[in-house]
């Protein structure tokens, strides 16, 4: 269902989305700040993101939004200034936008909401952004984002149901 993940690699939702893409062998791309700067460090070269010349937060957001077919904000609690900016930029560029408040929705519901939204808007290239690591909002945001993306792709359900690759004929 997801054919491409877009992300800028900031700690929290964005880096988790890139790691999920690598884990699931989904192409990924995005825009990060010049010199690959992220909050608290430098984004590793293993991530296929480009540096933006303009250091503006809003320029980086807009490039990631425009390069996707739709934007999913995974957040905890009310939208903060950055998340509101994402919504405004998505609306300005006529791109579908979805905010999933993970403090209100269990992961399986977040997965179902996102899948339904993707189907409705025929989206396969998604920009994932949202809550950053820290701030006490969710110590597990990284793991939860990976679980959401795996769920969207059907990985968790297949593992839960016990589907495994088999070399033998199972048609009998």
Image: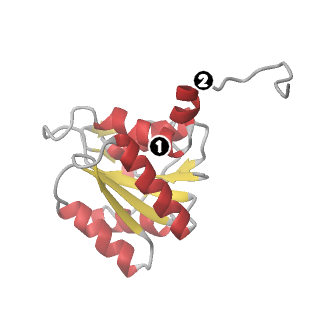
Residue 2 higher or lower than 149, as above or below: below
Q: Position of residue 22 (x, y in %)?
A: 55, 36
Q: Residue at x 58, y 67 (%)?
A: 122
**Which numbered dot is residue 57?**
none
Q: Kindly state the secondary structure of the residue where label 2 is placed.
A: loop
Outermost left residue:
136
Find the distance from the CA under tag 1 to the CA under tag 2. Answer: 19 Å
Please state which of the two labelled residues, at mark 1 or mark 2, is closer to the viewer: 2
Most foreground residue, 18 or 165: 165
Q: Residue at x 47, y 70 (%)?
A: 66
Q: Position of residue 135 (x, y in %)?
A: 13, 40
Most foreground residue, 31 or 158: 158
Residue bearing the label numbered 1: 149
Q: Position of residue 101 (x, y in %)?
A: 26, 53
Residue bearing the label numbered 2: 162
Q: Work out whether residue 104 can be spotted.
A: yes
Q: Quadrant of residue 170?
A: top right
The mark nearer the N terminus, 1 or 2, is: 1
Q: Kindly state the secondary structure of the residue where label 1 is placed.
A: helix
Q: Position of residue 103 (x, y in %)?
A: 22, 46
Residue 15 higher or lower than 80, as above or below: above
Disc tally is 2
Q: Residue at x 51, y 64 (%)?
A: 68
Outermost front residue:
172
Most foreground residue, 151 or 172: 172
């Amino acid at each position: 269902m997801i054919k491409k993940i877009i992300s800028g690699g900031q700690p929290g939702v964005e880096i988790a989305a890139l790691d999920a893409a690598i884990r699931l062998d989904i192409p990924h791309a995005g825009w990060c700040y010049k010199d690959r700067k992220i909050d608290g460090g430098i984004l590793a070269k293993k991530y296929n993101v480009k540096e933006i010349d303009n250091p503006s937060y809003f320029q980086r957001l807009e490039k990631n939004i425009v390069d996707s077919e739709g934007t999913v904000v995974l957040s905890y609690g009310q939208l903060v200034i950055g998340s509101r900016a994402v919504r405004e930029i998505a609306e300005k560029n006529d791109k579908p936008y979805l905010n999933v408040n993970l403090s209100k929705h269990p992961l399986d519901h977040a997965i179902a909401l996102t899948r339904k939204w993707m189907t409705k808007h025929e989206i396969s290239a998604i920009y994932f952004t949202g809550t950053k690591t820290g701030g006490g909002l969710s110590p597990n945001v990284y793991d939860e984002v990976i679980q959401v993306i795996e769920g969207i792709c059907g990985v968790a359900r297949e593992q839960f149901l016990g589907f495994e690759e088999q070399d033998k004929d199972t048609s009998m």
